[in-house]
């Protein structure tokens, strides 16, 4: 989806919104797009913030589920049947981290081009 971006400042802020997803922690990647979403009146920037927030919330859910699966597999290790599952779920958690970096960079590049990129696997909480 291509929309009018307005000035270069809007493009730069939208790039920052997407790249903020690379920040470590669970809450920090949500703060930047949420603060800008609340503060701005620009429709293009609001759309970019919503796309970034949808992805970060979805990613949080995916990571939480993976974390629960890791905890369950560690408990199963006590029973000597979870040794295969824990490394697999650990790898999945690492892959989610890598995918987040890749998706955030792609979204930032698309934002620079004036495109509101739809993150794959993103649940549309905000429309």
Image (spheres, rainbow, N blue to C red):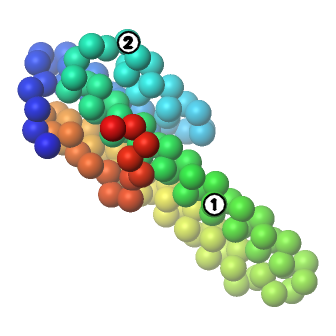
From the viewer's side, name the closer residue of 126 and 71: 126
Q: Position of residue 66 (x, y in %)?
A: 63, 63
Looking at the image, residue 71 sits to the left or right of residue 49; the answer is right
Q: Is residue 91 above or below residue 47?
A: below
Position of 29 compared to 106: left or right? right
Residue at the image position 84 percent from the left and 79 percent from the top: 77
Query: Which corner quadrant holds the C terminus?
Result: top left
Q: Residue at x 66, y 75 (%)?
A: 87
Q: Quadrant of residue 40?
A: top left
In the orientation shown, which residue stands out farthest toward the bottom?
Answer: 81
> Callout 2: 10 Å neighbours few (<14), some, many (20+)?
few
| x 55%, y 57%: residue | 62
Where in the figure is residue 71, as x and y percent of width and height?
77, 65
Residue 107 visible in the current orientation = yes
Q: Is residue 70 left or right of residue 96?
A: right
- Alpha-carbon span between mark 2 and mark 1: 32 Å
Image quarter of the N terminus: top left
State the residue position of label 1.
Answer: 65
Q: Which label was assigned to residue 39?
A: 2
Residue beneath the point at 12% across and 16% down = 7
Q: Secondary structure at mark 1?
A: helix
């Amino acid at each position: 989806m291509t929309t009018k971006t307005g000035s270069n400042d809007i493009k730069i802020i939208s790039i920052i919104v997407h790249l903020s997803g690379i920040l470590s922690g669970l809450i920090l990647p949500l703060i930047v797009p949420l603060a800008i979403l609340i503060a701005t009146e620009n429709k293009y920037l609001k759309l970019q913030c919503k796309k970034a927030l949808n992805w970060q919330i979805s990613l949080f859910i995916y990571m939480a589920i993976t974390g629960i699966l890791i905890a369950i597999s560690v408990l199963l290790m006590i029973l000597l049947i979870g040794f295969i599952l824990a490394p697999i779920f650990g790898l999945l958690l690492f892959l989610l981290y890598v995918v987040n970096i890749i998706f955030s960079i792609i979204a930032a590049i698309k934002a620079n081009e004036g495109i509101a990129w739809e993150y794959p696997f993103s649940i549309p909480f905000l429309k």
